[in-house]
Amino acid sequence: MRSDVASRVRTKPPIAPDQRVLVAGVDEAGRGPLAGPVVVAAVILDPSRPIVGLDDSKKLSERRREVLYLQVIERALAHCVIVVETEEIDRINIFQATMVGMSRAVAGLSPTAHEALVDGNALPRDLPCAGRAIVGGDALEPAISAASILAKVSRDRLMVQLDAEHPGYGFAVHKGYATPGHLDALQRLGPCPHHRRSFAPVGRALEQMTLF
């Protein structure tokens, strides 16, 4: 087992019989883009305030995500959204940045979770509670779906802000992903402060700038 990845299932001491077990869903948005932060969310849903229509955020329209985002914020028992900036991504790599963000998001919940269901196949080694990694969990577990929606909407909003601060790249449209339009802008304009220098296309653009 890799030293930087926890077991896919981690257990903690049993919960007292009279204590309600609180389960958090955890997911991220923005591992693949060339620019912008990775955003991680953790959500504990409230069974007494159900939310209809939760699903993997990628399967939902932008309008539907926005509606569900507001419902999750209003009805969830607890939620926490963490932004891991580009500088930290470049310093520790995107995988570690995602793991760090997951740990921070779960640690930021109040009330605290007894167990975290994490989308994917790896758990952060310093997750502050028991955890299970679930491949495709954002389409299987409502709490992970809710976290997926919070992370996606939060990141999209941040990228719209970055578009206003750094016009010309099209961040509001492609959200930092390596679309042909983004790659063309990267070649013409060079990287902005929010581009991930550790990602190959950005590194190549920097190298080209130094040649001229």
Image (cartoon, rainbow, N blue to C red):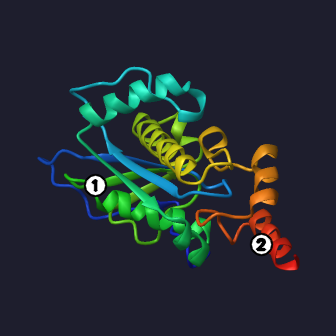
Q: In the displayed structure, does residue 149 sit left or right of residue 4?
A: left
Instruction: Give percent across and percent down for residue 137.
Output: 53, 41
Looking at this view, name the residue that lies furthest to the top.
52
As drawn, the label of residue 27 is none
Along the line of sight, which residue is nearer the eye, 201 or 70?
201
> Which quadrant: the N terminus?
bottom right
Question: Local crowd at mark 2 within 10 Å, few (<14), some, or many (≥20)?
Answer: some
What residue would you read off at disc 2? 206
What residue would you read off at disc 1? 114
Amino acid type at mark 1? His
Q: Secondary structure at mark 2?
A: helix
Along the line of sight, which residue is nearer the eye, 16 or 115?
115
Q: Secondary structure at mark 1?
A: loop
Report the residue at 11% width, 47% height from top: 18
Report the residue at 34% width, 57% height from top: 106
Amino acid type at mark 2? Leu
Residue 77 vertical placement versus 121 (above, below): above
CA gap, disc 1 and disc 2: 45 Å
> Which quadrant: the C terminus?
bottom right
Instruction: Give percent across and percent down for residue 151.
Output: 46, 45
